[in-house]
Amino acid sequence: MKLSQVLGKSLWAYLFNSGSCNGCEIETVACATPRYDLERFGIKLVGSPRHADLLLISGPVTRKMAPRLRRVYDQMPAPKLVVCIGACGTSGGAFYDSYALVGPVDQIIPVDTYVPGCPPRPEAIIDGVVKAIARLEDQENAAS
């Protein structure tokens, strides 16, 4: 089953910063430039989680951002995918033992794919998104 059959449209992604240094955001926005052209895969960055099928998260989750992250995740329609970008989101990175952190993203919401790096290259981010899409397609194939 193809992604267009699962979602009925192209994949729309929402970028959420949960406390990062903005290095991952710069690389994620670079994915939309003509050099990497994320839209050629049918993936579009959107400004609202209510329109998004994919949540791209960067940074470790701070205490103030944890409830907001949960709320953003809950606002997304099903089926939803989550890709955690960067070392900070996956393990806390350099801030892993900070008093201000709740922890990595997977302690707050379920994560489908991890993209390691500090910051990861745009190619790695695109690869992580493609792997998340493949995981969703595999789930839909198993269900049908």
Image: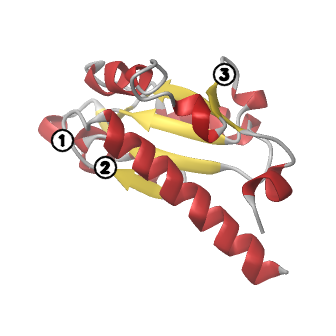
User: Number of callouts in the render?
Assistant: 3
Secondary structure beneath dot 1 equals helix
- Give coordinates of residue 43: x percent, y percent: 62, 35
Q: Which residue is drawn at 70% across and 41% down?
A: 53
Q: Which residue is drawn at 71% across and 34% down?
A: 52
Secondary structure beneath dot 3 equals loop
Q: Quadrant of the C terminus?
A: bottom right
Q: In which quarter of the image is the N terminus?
A: bottom right
Q: Viewer-proximal residue, 122 or 52?
A: 122
| Residue 80 numbered tag | none
Q: Distance between the residues labelled 2 and 3?
A: 23 Å
Q: Distance between the residues labelled 3 and 1?
A: 27 Å
Q: Is 122 situated above or below 111?
A: above
Secondary structure beneath dot 2 equals helix
Dot 1, how many residues are within 10 Å of its Cα: few (below 14), some (14-19), or many (20+)? some
Dot 2, how many residues are within 10 Å of its Cα: few (below 14), some (14-19), or many (20+)? many
Tag 1 near tag 2, CB within 8 Å:
yes
Which mark lies nearer to you, 2 or 3?
3
Tell me which label, 2 or 3, sits earlier in the chain: 3
Give the residue at mark 2: 90
Give the residue at mark 3: 46
Q: Quadrant of residue 3?
A: bottom right
Residue 103 visible to the viewer: no
Q: Residue at x 64, y 28 (%)?
A: 44
Q: Viewer-proximal residue, 34 or 70?
A: 34
| Residue 93 numbered tag | 1
